[in-house]
Amino acid sequence: MVKNAGGARIGAMQSLRSLVIACALLALPCSALAAQETVWDFTNGNAPGEWRVTGLSPAPTLGRDGLRIRSSREGRIEHVFAPQHRVDLVTIEYTSMQDAELLFLFADGDKVYQIPVKVYATATPQEVQPPVTNYKAWDPRTEMVGIAVPAGLDLTLQRITVSSVNPVEKVGYVLQGLLKFDTAKPYIINFLWGPRLVFTPAELNDLFVTIPPKAPSVNVLLYGLIVIVIIVCVAMVRSRKWQVSRACTLCCITVATLWIAYDVRMGSEFMGYLQDDYNMYWSMPPEDRIFRVRGSFNAYAEMMAPILQQVPEYGFVAGDENYVDFLRYITYPSLPVRPEAMGTGITLLAVFNRPDALMDADGRLILGTGFQTPPGDVVAVYDLDSFLFRIRQ
Amino acid sequence: MTILSIAIGIGVPALNGWLALRVLEGAHPVLARWERWAIGAILGATLTVFIQFLLLWSGIIGVNTAGLLMSSGGTTLVLGIVWLWQCKGLKGISIALPASAPLPVWGRWLAGIAAVWIVLKLCTGGFLLIMSPPYYDDVINNWNFRAKTLLHRNALTLTLDRGYGVVDTNTVTSYPPSIPLIKANMTILMGRWSEGLVNLPHIVWYALALVILFWQLRWRLSLGWGLVGTYLLSSIPLYLLHGSVAYADLFLSIHVLIAVSLCYRALIAADGAHARSLLLIAALSAGLTAFTKNEGTVLLFPLLAACIAVVTIWRMRNDPRAIKTLLLCAALCAALVLPWIAYKWMNGLGFGNAKDVSGLDIGWQKGVVGALLRNSFLTGGWLLFFPCLIALLVVHWRNALRTPLVLITGFLLCTYGLQAMIYLFTSLSVEAIYQTGYGRGVVQLLPTACLLATVLLHEAKRTLVDRHTNA
């Protein structure tokens, strides 16, 4: 019996060794699948290929820092090329004088598609990667790429790189995607997206930013894995190599393992909410507190509430009317009213995140909508756009 | 002061619940000692504020210290007297759980690791609930806000000031005032509004949901399987999230669990007197469901009442005294549900949840099937619960449908089916398409579904072992 057990163990070791060698041999071609890339470099006055300019006035100029686009009209630049490799990733390097939204353009046959891309004001070169593979229309063998810019933008394009992502890198991004957590957004009370499958850095960056996430759910992969295990078990039972009980046990262990791993993943995401709240809210001084999607509103409300609660009604104006409910809840029974409805007796006006609010020389508060108050004074300041204004009696 | 507020705010209703359960059990106790306290803490909280609601409605009391003393203290006094008169002492008030083999060493390790993980998540939820500012819409517009309004107006209210001159009528004011009253009572005890304090009961209810599910499983299964089921419920992310948010769905789900599981125990009880005790407690929980959330009144209570009726009628075959139980259950349910319905009817309040049921457009709704499937199978909120439960139901359909388990299976299928029908055929479909209502409906059924899944899983294991032994 001992001899037999030893023999079985040696057999198992040999099988394992064969498996490892087979895996290594299978993995070898991956080295040949290294990422390939094509770079269009506009720096140092280079003109990388032929780029068609449409609508931009004045025309973009090539300089040491790249292609400067400073147009008073909206327009675009496009490049038609013969693809040398698959394109999974597009990287745009730029500097910009303003925050803006560009459109990345690509063609699939005769149709041209556009993907919104945000650029930020920066003097040092930045990269942005439109999540092209998230779009069904994306053609990895596209023969045209381009950029459409809004009027008035001052942007310097340094490089556009199109590249492939090799299978090993994709596995890496899948693992990073599994461990990227969503934050505590208002919708989580109704559903949690859970881990998603991403294969490129652009998809990873876009994960939980675009709602709903374009990346497929990891559940698809898990169901596939479970189905494969079930098929293997059925095959082994049918070929009389395994007993039914052994096959069922393997199925149960597979599901239980996936369940526990999933629980750990989702539990960690839940703990991530706490970590975010600690880092951005609890541990910060009151004036610097940021609370989830509401940003600095809670810090503002906590600062103003003691003053607002001294009156039965107060005016309130904010960049987003959703804040009315929150401020009403915090200051109740004191109630907010629209600034236009502030009659006699209502002297306090809470202003939150209104860059258009200005004071004239007489002390009147004037909003961008044209609304203006009688003369008064700012009695509490959170920041330049958020403060408390009291009308003089 | 905070600790005193918590102790009295949660402790007195729990005592009321404990007394109510003892009165209903009478000479035939059916609950274990800690199980009675856990169930008592849930049902007692609802029962106490239900009595407070009756007194407020009649104008006898206000939402203030005197009113709280009269309603909570009065309930304790009345129930205490009835209990003392009925039971005459404290002896023999609990029964022992079925014996279970101790866990093996590896099982103890696993249970220990799972316990640490659950406690970690529980603490995280507690911190989020107590320390973070109010964040979700129904907290600031409904549950917590209505508590503030009750305190400010010192009476039940049919309108809510929403600010900007908007006054809500017949929207969230049609919801039962149970949870707002619980929060108002804690504030009265504290002497001032404290966001952390009024949110605290929600995480306590989450912990109690786990404890109650464990006890319900233990009556049927071994210690190990009780722990498996408890872990199962604790691992569902969306249920945990509802434990850390001041919403009512989790609270409602515990009432449903208590009613269904006790009904099931009554169905399989060997002794008629024990079945009577179990059915009366189930009726108490079912009746209070109507006072917990609007879905409780229009959807869950009728189905729970049907379960109780079916079990009682079934027991009539061998026990002619079951007719008396049926009448008692009916009277108890009527006493708990009719006042609330009368209040709503007299004040013209709607019976729907997001929309009044009478105002719903009927017809096939596009996009709902896809939305339900996506939410159930392709999001992280349920882990792999839906496919696993469906697989268990398919593989063990005989156990699920041809044994007393059919009560739980039938209840879940009917309730889920009705919820799905509402989304598929009425204008409430937006709640499913935008994923704002569907998940909450599932949360309300989740502990009961975990109970069923665990029992079926146990059956699966038993079948496997039997087959292996026979082979």
Image (cartoon, coloured by chain):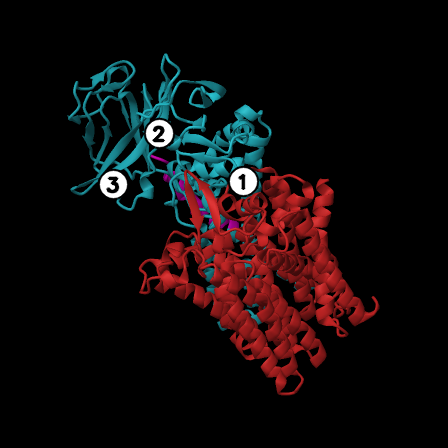
Chain colours: A cyan, B red
Q: Earlier in the sequence, mark 3 or mark 2?
A: 2
**Residue B20 image position (x, y, % from top left):** 70, 65
Quadrant placement of the N terminus of chain A: bottom right
Q: Is residue A28 magenta?
A: yes
Q: Which residue is mark 2?
A: A128
**Residue A30 image position (x, y, % from top left):** 40, 42
A201 on left or right of A382:
left
Quadrant placement of the C terminus of chain A: top left
Q: Is residue A139 visible?
A: yes
Asked if A383 appears above or below B25 in the picture, the reply is: above
Report the predominant secondary structure element of the magenta stretch.
helix
Asked if A341 appears above or below B201 in the picture, the reply is: above
Q: CA distance from mark 3 to mark 2?
A: 21 Å
B72 on left or right of B346:
right
Q: Chain of mark 2?
A: A
Q: Chain of mark 1?
A: B
Report the amino acid beneath label 3: Arg
Give yes or no for contact between labels 3 and 2 (Cβ–Cβ under 8 Å): no
